[in-house]
Amino acid sequence: MDNIEDILRALAEDDDEQPEEHSEANSEEGGLFSGLDPEMLMRMLSLFEMFNQPSDNERFLLALKPLLREENRPKIDSAVRLLKLFSLLPVLRESGLFEKLL
């Protein structure tokens, strides 16, 4: 976790343009990334990794795609997008985003 914080601090600092005093004041206040929670960043990273890994159902649909007629192939792409969205629902439910809606 410290590595991510170090990387974010390095990105926030611009040693070429800022004097040393300004840099120290910036680090005390938190700098550009002061409002970001490292735990939330890690959750988002795992969410993106999950989103990029195809499930068995997605692989199955993509394998069927070349066997379909040209006009039906876009339907496979839509179905794959829907499967990805449905896979995100449990994560969104855990985040508490839907509490106000239900």
Image (cartoon, rainbow, N blue to C red):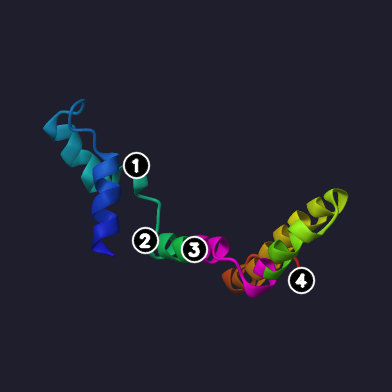
Question: Mark 3, mark 4: which one is toward the viewer?
Answer: 3
Residue 15 in sight in this render: yes
Residue pointed to by mark 4:
102
Would you name the residue on which mark 2 appears? 38
Element marked by disc 3: helix
Report how far apart the C-alphas of labels 3 and 2 lie in the structure: 17 Å
Q: Main secondary structure of the magenta part?
A: helix
| Residue at the (66%, 63%) spot, across then down | 84
Earlier residue among tags 1 and 4? 1
Q: Amino acid at mark 2?
A: Pro
Q: Quadrant of residue 15?
A: top left
Looking at the image, tell me whether mark 1 or mark 3 is earlier in sequence order. 1
Rounded to the nearest angstrom, the CA distance separating label 4 from label 2 is: 29 Å
Q: Is residue 21 above or below residue 1?
A: above
| Residue 98 visible to the viewer | no
Q: Amino acid at mark 3?
A: Glu
| Picture disc at residue 32 | 1
